[in-house]
Image (spheres, grey):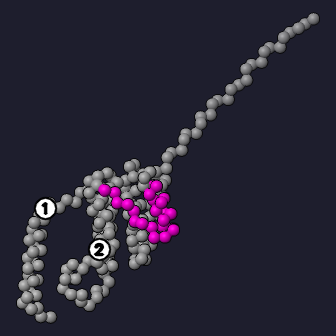
Amino acid sequence: MRLSARSLACFSALAIGALALAGCAGDDFDDTASGSAFSQALYKDYTDLASQAAALPQQAAPEDDGFFSSLFGDDEPENLPANLFSAKADLAQSGQEPAPEAAPDALSSGLRTRLVQAIDAGKTQFPDLAATAQTDFDCWIIYAASQTTASATCKTQFDSALVRLEAASRPAPPPAPVASAPVAPPPAAPPADYTV
């Protein structure tokens, strides 16, 4: 493939611009999360999911969509999970609590309802477990259409995390009433002696 002088100049200008922007970034990158312990745990878990999604093998790329699509075309379906998880990680990093993904069917809708109730009940006391349950749910829903193996794994992990969160968040049962010692009947009055 032979590049024209104009293409080479454009490519060089883009490369220099990218280097200049990278130099401006410096050491200002902050990878700590703010907000509640729950949002911090969400940030950690969504970041892990984004990294795992980005590391999945990519499908074969189409022939050639052109020069600019290779630079800006990150809308490929295989990049969607990584992009979604990254967006949720960014929200959590800023202290927000992103909502679980919308449920596409009745089964997942019922499970999502249980999840939201369990998160509301346990995110303060059990932030890591609540974040794990939410991110496993999102993993299951996001991968449901494309990655059946990943989706099945996420669903299994979600089922386990949801049950653990619900059990941990359940209020303790009231203490059993204390049985008092049996009360002996009062002593009978001595029989009256009536001798006639």
Q: Magenta segment range?
A: 96-118
Residue 182, picture quadrant: top right
Q: Which mark is residue 81?
A: none
**85 lies above or below 6:** above
Residue 27's disc number: 1
Residue under pointer 2: 54
Looking at the image, tell me whether mark 2 or mark 1 is earlier in sequence order. Answer: 1
Find out whether residue 104 is within the magenta segment. Answer: yes
Q: Mark 2: give few (<14), some (14-19) or many (20+) Cα within 10 Å.
A: some
Element class at badge 1: loop
**Residue 18 appears at what percent x and percent y?**
12, 74
The residue depicted at 46 percent of the width and 52 percent of the height is 168
Left or right: 26 in relation to 173: left
* 72 is higher (above) or lower (below) than 63: above
Visible in this render: residue 160? no
In the image, 163: left or right of 13?
A: right
